[in-house]
Amino acid sequence: MPMNDTTKMFVNKVLHLSKKIPLIRSKLDAFKETKRLEILQMEKDAYWKEFSGDCYGGFYGIYKSFSEARSSAPKTKLNNYDSIEQAEWDKKQFELHFEKLQAYDYPVIYWISRLHELTGKPFRVLDFGGNAGNHFYAYKKAIIHDFIEKWVVCDLPNIVSVGEEFKKYHEARLLSFVNSLPENYDVDLFLASGSIQYVDESNPAFFIKYLKRKPSYLIINRIPLLNGENKSKITLQNVHKSYSPMYTYNYNEFFASFCSIGYEILDIWRDFSCNCIIPHESRLQIPYYHGTCMKLM
């Protein structure tokens, strides 16, 4: 039976007075906190269920190590990116978007063109995590200059197999593949687009120690950087057919790691096509990624 105005006023007055009594107030506060935590857990459980399914690009958790992240992954799919299933999915995406540029590619194209104009010579490119040659085909079509002397893609064995097979049917004599960083390859331009954060190395400049010499230029794109005092963290990403641990770097520490070994920052840009946001996790909220171009001084 609906309450009339007089009854409502009486109930509200009783509630108001009861809040002033310490024992009742503490009971009410405890009840509200219990319900808040119950709702929060329900929301976390719902997100975990979503993350365990087809939540492509979603993130979950903060971990102390890559091994801890892998062991915490849902059992609904593989926790190893180097799988036939993941490579087949990447192949389909590669064929679907062959030679097509994404929004995040344009700063890279600008800087490759600009650096080619400044140096006046083609580059020996090492494309770290370059998949089946996605960047090679798309950038070669978009940039009118003859800017490639040699283009080497470094990626996981199953993905390299896809790239090698695809190369047989396309004009790609300047393209080659390796599944580990080539120690004896002279690199003019090191390119990494959305890749170095998936390597179990806390220092983002880790790749330098594996190369014959420091590359003259670095273009690192699609990087998750934490602002302020937030330290670098490890999270877990759903990458469609598998789960993969991923570093999120502190902004200042990321650039300091390169400046400390002799690199000068030429440009920094924001990539709004990517983000890393974990519901109910205030320590890891990255609304957009970054890209950068650097020059060896």
Image (tube, rainbow, N blue to C red):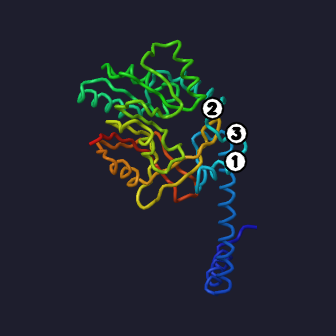
Residue at x 59%, y 48% (from the top left corner): 236
Whether the residues at callouts 3 and 1 have beta carbons within 8 Å, the answer is: no
Residue 288 percent location from the top left of the image: 44, 46
- Left or right: 42 in relation to 120: right
Which amino acid, by three-letter code, is at mark 2?
Gln
Q: Quadrant of residue 53?
A: top right
Quadrant placement of the N terminus: bottom right
* Above or below 77: residue 2: below
- Left or right: 233 in relation to 6: left
Measured Cα–Cα span from mark 3 to mark 2: 10 Å
Label 2 residue SS? helix
Quadrant placement of the C terminus: top left
Q: Which mark is residue 86?
A: 2
Label 1 residue SS? helix
Label located before the other in sequence (3 or 2): 3
Mark closer to the observer (3, 1): 3
Residue at x 45%, y 24% (from the top left corner): 100
Q: Which mark is residue 49?
A: 1
Residue at x 50%, y 25% (from the top left corner): 177
Residue 56 percent location from the top left of the image: 60, 39
Q: Which mark is residue 77?
A: 3
Q: Callout 2: 10 Å neighbours few (<14), some, many (20+)?
A: some
Q: Callout 3: 10 Å neighbours few (<14), some, many (20+)?
A: some
Residue 143 percent location from the top left of the image: 34, 22
Which amino acid, by three-letter code, is at mark 3?
Lys
Measured Cα–Cα span from mark 3 to mark 1: 13 Å
